[in-house]
Amino acid sequence: MIHYEFIAGWLKAHTKTERGASLVEYALLVALIAVVCIGAITFLGNEAADNFSEVGNSIN
C-alpha cells in the first residue's frame, strides 16, 4: 500500500506541471513557421526562376 501511495503522489506532482502543454505549443509554432517558410520559398522560387529565365533570354 505504501508503494501505491508513493506512485500516486509522484504522478500527481508531475502531472500538475504545464510542461506538456508548452511542448505542444512549441511544436505547433514550429509547424506554422515551417509552413510559412515553404510557402515563401515556393512563391519566391517561381518568381526568381522567371526573372533568371528573362535575363538569360535577353543575353542570348
Image (spheres, rainbow, N blue to C red):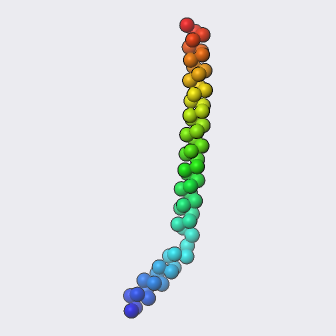
Q: Residue furthest bottom?
A: 1
The N terminus: image quadrant? bottom left
The answer to which image quadrant residue 16 occupies is bottom right
Above/below status of 15 relative to 36? below
Above/below status of 14 relative to 34? below
| Point 60% across, 33% down: residue | 43
The C terminus: image quadrant? top right
Q: Position of residue 17 (x, y in %)?
A: 55, 73
Q: Position of residue 26 (x, y in %)?
A: 56, 57
Numbered disc total:
0
Q: Position of residue 29 (x, y in %)?
A: 58, 53
| Point 55% across, 40% down: residue | 38
Front in this rendered view, residue 11 or 39: 39
Q: Residue furthest top?
A: 60
Above/below status of 21 relative to 27? below
The answer to which image quadrant residue 34 occupies is top right
| Point 58% across, 47% down: residue | 33
| Point 58% across, 39% down: residue | 39
Q: Position of residue 27 (x, y in %)?
A: 54, 56
